[in-house]
Every structure is written in C-alpha cells, then in structure tokens.
Amino acid sequence: MKKTHLVFVSLLLILCSCGGKTKRNTTENNVTGIEKAEAFGWNLAIQSYTFHKFNVIEALDKTKELGIHYIEIYPGHKLGGEWGDTPFGYQMTKEQIKGIKDLAASKDIMIVGTGVFTTDNPDDWKLLFDFAKEMNLEFITCEPNIEHWDIVEELSKESGIKVAVHNHPKPSNYWNANLLMDQIKDRSTTIGSCADIGHWSREGFDPTESFKTLQGRVISLHIKDILDKPEDGSWQEDTIWGNGILNLEEIFSELKKQDFKGFLSIEYEYNWGNSVNDIKECIKHYEELTDKIF
C-alpha cells in the first residue's frame, strides 16, 4: 500500500507540474495584439471629433464604453454638464481644467492631446502651450502658419510638449508629406507629423510611401479607412477598418519598422450619431492586425 501510495503521489505531482506549465503557456499565448502593440509603445486613442455631435462628457462615456484609455480633444468641443457650452481650449479656467481632467481620470481616461489647432494670431501659440502644460498634454495637433514656425518650435522645446502637424487636404500647407518635411527637417525632433492616412489617400498618396518620406518624424496618427472614390468624384466616406481601400497591415508594418512610438487616434467620420458599434468593429480589426504584426 505504501508503494502504491507513493507512486500515486508522484504521478499527481507530475500532472500538477504539467498542468502549471500549460497554464503559463496559455497565459502567454493569450496576450492580445493590442497589448503587444502597447508594450511596443503604441497607444490607441480617440479623436473626440469622432463624437462631435455630443459634448465632451458624452464623448468620454463613449470612449470608456469602447475600452479606450486615451483621448485627443478638438478645440471648441463643448464640455457639457456643469460647464455647459464652455469650449475645450485655452479659454478654460484652471478650475474647469482640473474638473475635466478629474472627470476623465474617474473614467480611467487620460486627455493626451488637443487639435487640430489653427490660428492667424502668433500670440495664440503661447496661450495654447500654457493651456497644454496645465492640462498635462503630451502633444498638440496643429497646422501652423509658415511664418509662425520659429515661435512654435521655441515653445515646444521650452515646454517639452510635442507638435504633431496635421495634413488636411489642399489648400492646407501640409497636404503632402514632402511639404511638411520642407518645414520641419531642420527643426527640433519634438516636431513631427500627425498623419491623417485618410486625407493622404484622398489626395492620391500611398500612406506607406508618405511614412517613408517622413523618415520617422511621426508624433501621432489619425487612423481611418475610406471607400474607393465614387464615379462622380465626390467625397470618399470613412468606413469600418478593413472594409475600405487602405492597406492598414502594410501601413502598420511600416510604422513598426520605423520604431514608431506614440498615439494612434481613431477618427471615425461616419454614422455620426451612432458610431460606437462601428468603432468596436474597427478595434477588432486593429486587434487582428496588431496580433499578426507583433
């Protein structure tokens, strides 16, 4: 009986050991693509213009529903709640800034950027950077006037806040990557692109080639997928990621190759009033691609 008992105990220990090893492997294999991308330095965010039909408080609620922890808020987005129609921006008081930061934090969300900011008044840049410091923002998305670049660069270097230059379509100063590089190639590396891949494609550029032109000078992205150009030449609408013409796998692979670290903001510009389920599908596609790439 003793011998039998010892054999049984030994077998039991072996089985437990094997079971523990299998469990560890399962845990490792269950790391999601998004988690692998985050470990590499990619953070999925929401550009609040996605929810511009709603106020900031409602946008934060929708961001939480999506399971996203970062948001970039566009200037002028109405705060809502106790703040009513107060616009997000440098006009906010310190009390309002603290209030909206605390509210976001209570939903496990960080406000990491603002944009797209434009101005013809050079004095506005100091106000914007002071606001960004008070908000603890990591970057400002903007399209500076050419004559404002010295001011913007100096403020960025002083504050450590990155400048992400967006590419609206023509007649924007930065509608293609070469135009942007002409302005920033000899400036601080705190300045780079906020690459809107949908706008590049609408202007006839391959986003992957545009990233190659930027040579790693990328701060953040506005991610979307778009439909093919209609025969009548009208606007190419956004669509759920993977259903459009953009080769997102190739784009993300190029970003990884360039060792990109930063925020990828979902900017879904369709089905404005009821887009959460669409965006969940976009996130699902992002999960599949990042799992494959990483």
Image (cartoon, rainbow, N blue to C red):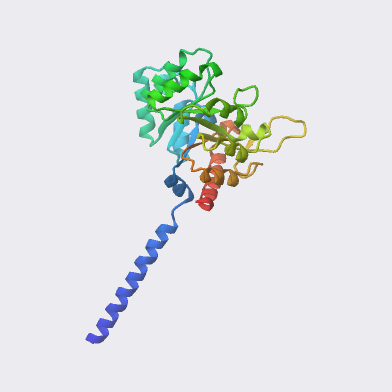
Please tell me how many numbered marks the rendered image carries. 0
Residue 6 image offset from top left, x and y in percent: 25, 82
* One can see residue 90 in this view: no
Left or right: residue 200 versus residue 231 is left
- Foreground of the two, 271 or 39: 39
Image quadrant where residue 248 sits: top right
Q: Is residue 289 above or below residue 116?
A: below
Please tell me which residue is depicted at 75% across the width and 30% down the height of the picture.
233
Please tell me which residue is depicted at 55% across the width and 40% down the height of the picture.
277
- Outermost residue toward the right in this view: 231
Please tell me which residue is depicted at 51% across the width and 17% down the height of the picture.
148
Left or right: residue 158 versus residue 203 is left
Residue 151 image offset from top left, x and y in percent: 46, 18
Residue 199 image offset from top left, x and y in percent: 62, 31
Which quarter of the figure is the N terminus placed in?
bottom left
Left or right: residue 118 versus residue 10 is right
Residue 244 image offset from top left, x and y in percent: 65, 41
Please tell me which residue is depicted at 41% across the width and 30% down the height of the picture.
138
- Outermost residue toward the left in this view: 2
* One can see residue 25 in this view: yes
- Foreground of the two, 258 or 42: 258
Image quadrant where residue 57 sits: top left
